[in-house]
Amino acid sequence: MPDDANAAEAWLLTFADQTLVMTKNGANRLGFAVLLLFYRANGRFPKKPTEIDDGTVARVARQVGAELDDRDWHDTTSRTWKRHRAEIRAWLGFREATVADAELLEAWLRDRVPAVGAVLDQLAALLETRCRELSIEAPAPDRVNRIVRAAIHAHDSRFCNGILGRLAAGTRERLEALLRPPGNGSDSPVSDSSAQPAPALLLRLRSDPGKPGLAGIQDELAKLALIRQIELPPGLFDGVLPHELERYRRRVSTEAPYELRRHPEPARLAWLAAFVHLRSRTLTDDLIDLLIETIHHIGARAEHRVDRELLDDLKRVAGKQNLLFEVAGAALEKPDGIVRDVVFPVVGEQTLRDLVKEAKATGPTYRTTLRTVIRNSYKGHYRRMVPQILQRLEFRSNNEHHRPVLSALDLLKRYADSKLQTFPAEEVVPIDDIVRGLWREAVVEKDAEGRQRINRITYEICVLEALREKLRCKEVWVVGADRYRNPDEDLSADFEAQRIPYYQALKLPLEADRFIADLQAEMREALRTLDAGMPANQLVRISRKRKQDGWITVTPFDPQPEPANLIALKAEIVATWPMTNLLDMLKETDLRLNFTDVLKSSTAYETLDRSVLEM
């Protein structure tokens, strides 16, 4: 962003300029000088006089020694204004654009559309810059708009015709079928006037995935299978920038099928192909998200269920070390006595039962129970959906260290239709980096002959958990995905060849010095704003002495107003129970539900008596 010094320098007349200006009479010097400097800076004349601020006009007036005359300066329809424009063009070596120039500019701009995108303002700015390079006066705004739109249309036509030429006849038919209901081979209306026509297949592909579950996963798999049946040619969109494909995808995502059928065949099929290409990647990502979330639910729901079942059994016993000493002393005093007669008088039977329950709820029994619940949950429900996802996706890795996970996935796919409970003894089953310590003793079993065998269901759970971690950090990636794609593709392979378009898409300059200068100017402007605004800000106090929390104190924000629904809820409660205290309502709720029974201390002891808590 240019600073004030550069802006002021652009509005300085050279010696030759002043010589030319002084040939005009006093009433026309100011207007001529302003038009000259504006044209030199922008390659065009101002669309209206108000485009130049009064301060700039005053600065030019001081250079030519003229008085400000609003009448003379703002009269854009006068013959003098037109004569001045012709003289300025000749002085600076510019000429007005012709019809041939417009055609050349349109062809030049057409080749820049892929890099910039169909953004009218940016393309118009490029057109004006090109006109200055060619010493051609930029056309009028309406004509610039027509040239830009014609360039976009020419680019789209060339692109769509190129895509259409690479599509086989069968692929074209399958793309066209997306605009019709399933099983409907023509555009003819439904014969039964009372029946509603079935929606087009395209509408089904547009829908978003639902919650993780068998129905949602099967629906996403059906969409992916439908898209893969179209069989787009490999590499159809190689070299096409992502924002270009996204533009075509949005057209298909927003227009109704009957509106898409009205477009010419090249545009219609090219847009549908771009939509199918990107939708395939999105569906793959959605399936991976569902897989990751499903794997998480297997463990999370099992933990919640086990915690709920063992919560009532979890009663921590205080003073376990003293109880141990008392039991040991009683046993040593009467080693031949009966437990009921020797131990129970010292430590009550119920206390010992509580100790056993605590050990079960916090020790190995908890982990064993959790493992069993996870296995049963996966076997009874999730196992019907997870293998279907694994069969449709192709997993890969660029690191040899993570190859065991891929080998395990291949093993699961090979035995997906098998009824075997364990893998064959001769099968090589990867264990390291897949089976964690909690599961190792459950995965490895021994058969009747004493040989170690791998339990299939338990091993599948371990593989899925390992796969989830690898996918989240992209150590394992999926073919055809977008967010879970090959991490090597995150950096563009054609960066050197497409360097300028990529920088233009990011709206960054090509020169490093200019990027640094622009960044420094932006930071200086922000610091100037902070420096000028902070002393006058009544909500900020700058201390003369350093405090514990710093030199600057910021006034806390005012509390936000209460939500309208909360106010309405309070009003309803007051209207229903006008004289009832909230604490009384809480007490009445406990008397009816006894919810304080589940309020247990997270430590090994409780200092508050249960009766006091209930009060």
Image: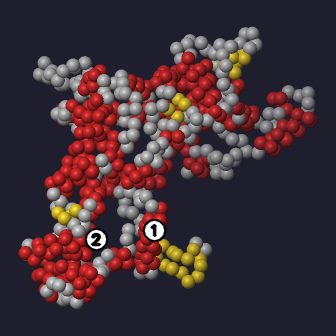
Q: Nearer the viewer, residue 176 or 270?
A: 270
- The residue carrying mark 1 is 517
- The residue carrying mark 2 is 41
Spot the residue most to the top: 449
Asked whether, in this view, residue 296 is left or right of residue 240, the answer is right
Residue 556 place in picture, x, y as percent: 46, 70
- For the point 43% across and 76% down, the residue is 528
Q: Quadrant for residue 255, please give it.
A: top left
Instruction: Please state which amino acid type lies under the numbered disc 1.
Output: Ala
- For the point 17% across and 84% down, the residue is 23
Q: Are dots 1 and 2 in contact, CB under 8 Å?
A: no
Instruction: Please state which amino acid type lies under the numbered disc 2.
Output: Ala
Residue 548 place in picture, x, y as percent: 61, 74
Residue 81 place in picture, x, y as percent: 12, 75
Mark 1 or 2 closer to N-term?
Answer: 2
Q: Is residue 375 visible?
A: no
Residue 293 place in picture, x, y as percent: 49, 35
Is label 1 in a helix, a strand or a loop? Answer: helix
Mark 1 neighbour class, 10 Å CA radius: few under 14, some 14 to 19, many 20 or more:
few
- For the point 59% across and 12% down, the residue is 420
Q: Nearer the viewer, residue 451 or 13?
A: 13
Asked whether, in this view, residue 359 is left or right of residue 566, the answer is right
